[in-house]
Amino acid sequence: MKRDMRLQEPMARHTTFRIGGPAERFFVPSGIGDLRAFLEERPREDPITLLGAGSNLLVSDEGIRGTVIHLGAFQSVRVENERLLAGAGVMLPGLLQQLARDGLGGLEFLGGIPGTVGGGVRMNAGTEGGWIADRLLSVTYLDASGTLRRQRREEITFGYRQMALPRGACIVGAEFRLEPDDPMRIAERLRERMADRRKRQPVHLASAGCIFKNPPGDAAGRLIEAAGLKGARVGDAQVSSQHANFVVNRGKARAADVLSLVRRIQERVRQESGVELAFEIEMVGVFEKGAVS
């Protein structure tokens, strides 16, 4: 079997922001065995970055040191007794459509999120309708040495847009609790969710989703809009006129443009409201002195 290892792969091809310099190495494992062999063989000092759909991610213009591992080959989907077992690389939109056709509900709150199962679990993806942790039964992963492990939901600590797994863990699959329901009702809930997202969010433009976490008791978008920053722009990076907590790529934005714009947002919101906005997106690569992946 020939290993799919690419050198200097442009990350702009693999992020929803359409931004990012080259990955030093870009590895697409064919399955658990291939990924395990790589983890067992790699030098421990070699940094790794896990990649699913490339959403919620800003890659620096200089790119990423070490190896980016793309988990797109982990596409298994199986349902047993209203339990869903899905591979880390399964895209959420397609999975939700399949579950709707099969009359299996419970995950419709994830409708419109353009990520993968693995990324959704790692970020505890969710909306006002719920969080992945609410439906999760277990997570399967390879640890940094390549050993396959499984942890039950109750053994994992989840927070707002985060979860706790051992350092270097590569999620390869997850198990969820589902509920039987009428396929038409499930499909209708998904349509409503998608319609709401299209109405409120700039889904037609390249972005990384919400840039900032919502502070307790408030919304980052409201604070940014109140600070007069809707439509603010640096190069081709622009605060969306539709939803102020989105920065969109108007065509040729660089990571440096995005970072300059979000720093301006943070400073203005701090001045206007006293709130320190925290990043929801993950920044990978070299952005500033000392800030590396």
Image (cartoon, rainbow, N blue to C red):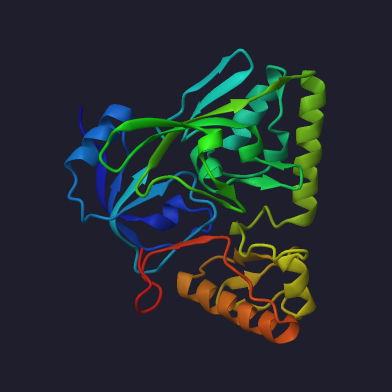
Left or right side of 36 for 273: right
Left or right: 166 in relation to 136: left
Q: Is residue 35 visible?
A: yes
Residue 209 percent location from the top left of the image: 62, 56
Query: Is 99 situated left or right of 181 in this image?
Result: left
Quadrant for the C terminus, please.
Answer: bottom left
Q: Quadrant of residue 284?
A: bottom left
User: From this viewpoint, which residue is outermost toward the top?
Assistant: 81
Image spot of residue 197 (x, y percent): 75, 49
What count of labels does the image hold? 0
Residue at 32% across, 29% down: 32
**In the visual, does 268 lie left or right of 143?**
right
| Residue at (64% x, 44% y) in the render | 113
From the viewer's side, name the closer residue of 177 and 101: 177
Residue 1: image quadrant is top left
Query: From the viewer's perspective, is residue 33 above or below residue 143?
Result: above
Q: Is residue 22 above or below residue 195?
A: below
Residue 71 visible (yes or no): no
Residue 267: horizontal and vertical position, in percent?
62, 83
Please state the horizontal and vertical placement of residue 5, each as a whole percent of the image: 25, 43
The furthest residue to the front: 155
Write the residue at 80% across / 47% down: 196
Q: Who's the residue at 62% across and 53% down the image? A: 160
- Compared with 176, 70 (above or below) is below
